[in-house]
Amino acid sequence: MTASNPPRDESHIHLDSTANLMNSISSRLAGQLRLVSLSGRRRPAPPALVLVAHGSRDPRALNTVRALMDRVGELRPGLPLHLGHIELNEPLLPGTLAALGDSPAVLVPLLLSRGYHVKQDIPEMAAAAPARVRLAAPLGPHPLVAETLYDRLVEAGWRTRMDDATRRTCAVVLAAAGSRDPDSATDTRRTARLLAARLGVPVVPAYASAAAPTVPTALRALAARGRHRVAVASCFTAPGRFATQCADQAPWIASAPLGAHPAMARLILHRYDRTLATPATTEPELASA
């Protein structure tokens, strides 16, 4: 005879469903109220937020970006949200911008450092669009990125408490895509310092392409210093070829990409808000503020 779970009280089911419905209605109502001024007149809709993803042949990447977009929408009901890719996935950014017509929009790159895409590709696509576009800084470096990296490492098995002897054998390789632009490496080093301050162990940047050191080189350098228990922190927005390649090289644990972490959704809105609060003649912020 097999055991069975007792049936759940139908009143509880009804109450849960009602609570979920009320939460949904409240969120939607709050979004609508933001569009109404104290005088009762309807405020103009806020500029659209366009999430600019790189694009990947890995189908998990698009699913991850859409999940992140959903989180942003939950935090800011009523904010028009759109998605555009630089390459490899639909919708491509030029098509997204064309569909906006001459409406105002803020582009937030889902990238973690400055580089060719941030400095050349995205501005060129924006300049060719009819939409009135402003460009936000990339997501990194920022303390919220370090917070997400830390949480992903803990999820992968990083010990939050360790004695001094264990700590002296531990380190992290911060695996990033890589770029020939020196500003990209500067940003990744800054992210590494933020994460090191959180973990209390060395964090060494390494790259999947276009920059040095590679992940294996960084691992060997740490082993030579007596750091044999080394984790690989995935400094990628979403799964893809580079993220998988770097994770496979981990001698111990490897964290998942940043993904749809709540802190990343908050960071996207922070970049959006800061851009709107900055005079249009000013260059997009590139610091961690």
Image (spheres, grey):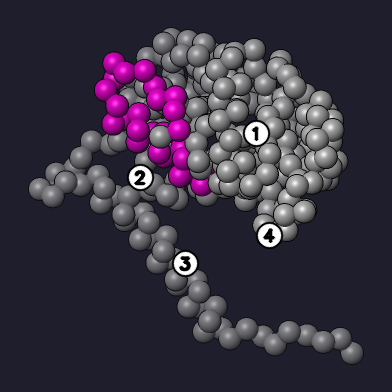
For disc 4, the marked residue is: 161
List the single residue furthest toward the right. 1
List the single residue furthest toward the bottom. 1
Q: Residue 234's quadrant in the figure?
A: top right
Report the disc number at residue 78: 2
- Name the quarter where the C terminus is drawn: top left
Q: Nearer the viewer, residue 240 or 96?
A: 240
Region of the chain picked out in magenta, as a range = 263-288
Q: Position of residue 123 (x, y in %)?
A: 46, 14
For disc 3, the marked residue is: 20
Residue 150 is at least partly visible in this image: yes
Give whichever of discs 4 and 3 has the lower sequence position: 3
Q: CA distance from mark 4 to mark 3?
A: 37 Å
Q: CA distance from mark 4 to mark 1?
A: 26 Å
Q: Residue 137's quadrant in the figure?
A: top left
Q: Nearer the viewer, residue 233 or 240?
A: 233
Q: CA distance from mark 4 to mark 2?
A: 42 Å
Q: Amino acid at mark 1?
A: Phe
Give whichever of discs 4 and 2 has the lower sequence position: 2
Q: Nearer the viewer, mark 4 or mark 3?
A: 4
Q: CA distance from mark 3 to mark 2?
A: 19 Å
Q: Are marks 3 and 2 in contact (CB under 8 Å)?
A: no
Report the disc number at residue 236: 1
Give whichever of discs 3 and 2 has the lower sequence position: 3
Q: Are marks 1 and 3 in contact (CB under 8 Å)?
A: no
Q: Amino acid at mark 4?
A: Arg
Secondary structure beneath label 1: loop
Q: Amino acid at mark 2?
A: Gly
Q: Nearer the viewer, mark 4 or mark 1?
A: 4
Give whichever of discs 4 and 1 has the lower sequence position: 4
